[in-house]
Image (cartoon, rainbow, N blue to C red):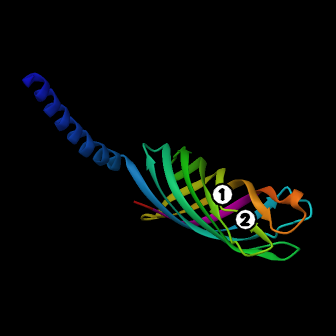
């Protein structure tokens, strides 16, 4: 019985060491990145009678790169002024997402591919609306790290898909919900720590 208690005590010590060691090691082999970006978006849908106008997107991405080739990031994008030839409908849409990155760093230049999931929130009081729904996104881009100290640049191209994300609040009911998508092209200031 004492041997079992001793083993449990040793396992607790080992768990504490691992709990302290892993964050310290990952911090030693990781880079934290913060990006403030400005871009354009091109929305689309399956509705033939609705043609969306392009707009401006702004946001922030915060992430971490591990071992140089892998990374994760969390992002927030605001796309104000969504409108169509019929008229404005959502003043703002908000995208939140979490992504995985695969990167190929080479002398300060880091091309990457990304894929992730998230959510979208739109307005509720207009003729059309973007439903609050889950989204998936995929894309890629280029990071140019440490141009001036920790300051660099980042360029992204992202495709967002929002299944059944567009909702028509007026008849005809057969067009009530349709898939909605956004193509985002952005560039921004990249801070690497």
Q: Position of residue 55 (x, y in %)?
A: 74, 71
Q: Which mark is residue 85?
A: none
Quadrant location, the C terminus: bottom left
Q: Which residue is mark 2?
A: 130
Q: Nearer the viewer, residue 83 or 38?
A: 83
Looking at the image, the residue that sits furthest to the left is: 2
Q: Which residue is mark 1?
A: 133
Q: Quadrant of residue 131?
A: bottom right
C-beta proximity under 8 Å, tags 1 and 2: yes
Q: Which residues are magenta?
A: 181-191
Could you classify mark 2 by the number of other residues whose Cα lies within 10 Å: few (under 14), some (14-19), or many (20 or more)?
many
Secondary element type, mark 2? strand
| Residue at 69% from the left image edge and 55% from the top image edge | 160
Q: Is residue 31 visible?
A: yes
| Residue at 64% from the left image edge and 54% from the top image edge | 134
Quadrant location, the N terminus: top left
Tell me if 42 is positioned left or right of 36 in this view: right
184 is within the stretch colored magenta:
yes
154 is within the stretch colored magenta:
no
| Residue at 81% from the left image edge and 70% from the top image edge | 53
């Amino acid at each position: 019985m004492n041997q079992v208690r001793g083993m449990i005590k040793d396992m607790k010590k080992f768990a504490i060491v691992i709990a302290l060691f892993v964050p310290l090691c990952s911090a030693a082999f990781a880079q934290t990145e913060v990006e403030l970006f400005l871009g354009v978006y091109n929305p689309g849908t399956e509705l033939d009678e609705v043609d969306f106008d392009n707009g401006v997107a702004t946001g922030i991405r915060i992430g971490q790169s591990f071992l140089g080739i892998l990374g994760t990031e969390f992002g927030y994008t605001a796309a104000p002024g969504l409108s169509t030839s019929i008229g404005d409908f959502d003043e703002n849409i908000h995208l939140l997402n979490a992504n995985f990155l695969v990167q190929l760093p080479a002398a300060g230049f880091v091309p990457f591919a990304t894929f992730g999931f998230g959510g979208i929130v739109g307005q509720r009081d207009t003729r059309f609306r973007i439903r609050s729904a889950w989204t998936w996104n995929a894309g890629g881009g280029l990071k140019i790290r440490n141009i001036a100290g920790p300051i660099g640049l980042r360029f992204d191209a992202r495709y967002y898909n929002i299944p059944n994300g567009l909702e028509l609040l007026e008849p005809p009911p057969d067009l009530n919900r349709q898939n909605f998508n956004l193509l985002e092209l952005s560039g921004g200031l990249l801070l690497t720590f």
